[in-house]
Image: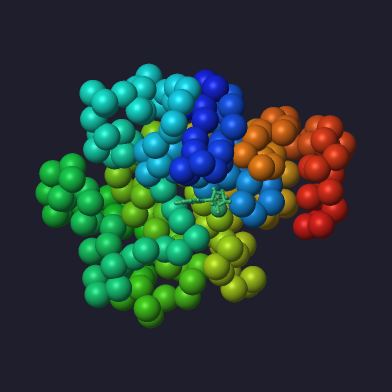
Amino acid sequence: MISFHQVNKHYGSFHVLKNINLHINQGEVVVVIGPSGSGKSTMVRCINRLETVTSGELVVDGVKVNDKNTDINKLRRDIGMVFQHFNLYPHKTVLQNITLAPTKVLGVSQKEAEETALYYLEKVGIPEKAEMLPTQLSGGQQQRVAIARGLAMRPKIMLFDEPTSALDPETIGEVLDVMKKLAKEGMTMVVVTHEMGFAREVADRIVFMDQGTILEDSTPEEFFASPREERARLFLSRIL
Ligand code: ADP
Ligand code: MG
């Protein structure tokens, strides 16, 4: 579903992604971890071309992401993304936040979009919040709306970049539970997170990045039992 072949990215003279090779199958959940500044966000953002790669090839669902003939809007429709900050429209209700893209981008009728929105609000556990404004919700609830909004586009892939990092500790669990459920249902997911409990329980694979390279790509069992790399060991000892 997602294939990085020898991908490099530079910001000016700064080499941020170095020779990335990563292959993610349909239905796989890959958790990306590593120190701040190691290139996790940049790598994930290349998948839907929020960042462009400098060299190498990146193929998503059979489409060459950086080919000039690629329909970037179509690519992005198939990829949901959830960020640390929820980026909900503050003056629109929860329901309007979720129905906006399906009606404007997919051309779905308002009625059908609302039914779909309610279905996904149900799925993330807050159907009763449909008519509220984002500011009337807790951080965890807002992030669940953001997830429902992504799902309403019926994506093939969901990308999560530190989705719980801005949340109060007591609401982190409710967001992770939704992500867990999504993983169980077979969604292809790439998740940048510092939540090691989630990584251990939900990930099919852990990718450890440091200074723009993938240092390890292994199962959680292997990774947490004995990271092969000293830098991974050091990282774990600091955050666990
Ligand atoms: P992570 O998500 O692992 O913290 P990032 O992918 O955000 O890392 O950033 C990797 C490196 O690239 C950092 O050193 C960061 O300062 C740098 N960087 C990120 N975005 C830009 C940008 N737009 N221009 C220049 N440097 C950037
Ligand atoms: Mg980041």
Examine the rendered structure and indicate whether residue 46 appears above or below residue 23.
below
Identify which residue is drawn at 36% across, 28% down.
Answer: 65
Examine the rendered structure and indicate whether residue 39 appears above or below residue 70.
below
Q: Position of residue 226 (x, y in %)?
A: 87, 36
Q: Position of residue 66 (x, y in %)?
A: 35, 28
* Any part of residue 85 in sight: yes
In this view, the residue in front, 87 or 99, is: 87
* Any part of residue 26 in sight: no
Q: How is the image coloured?
A: rainbow
Identify which residue is drawn at 80% across, 43% down.
Answer: 231
Q: Position of residue 114 (x, y in %)?
A: 22, 56
Q: Position of residue 211 (x, y in %)?
A: 66, 42
Identify which residue is drawn at 56% across, 69% down.
Answer: 167
Point out the residue furthest to the bottom here: 136
Using the rendered view, name the quadrant where residue 200 is placed: top right
Identify which residue is drawn at 64% across, 71% down.
Answer: 169
In this view, the residue in front, 208 or 38, is: 38
Using the rendered view, name the quadrant where residue 23 is placed: top right
Q: In which quadrant is the C terminus drawn?
A: bottom right
42 relative to 93 in the view: left or right: right
121 relative to 183 in the view: left or right: left
Q: How many marks?
A: 0
In this view, the residue in front, 127 or 46, is: 46
152 relative to 19 in the view: left or right: left
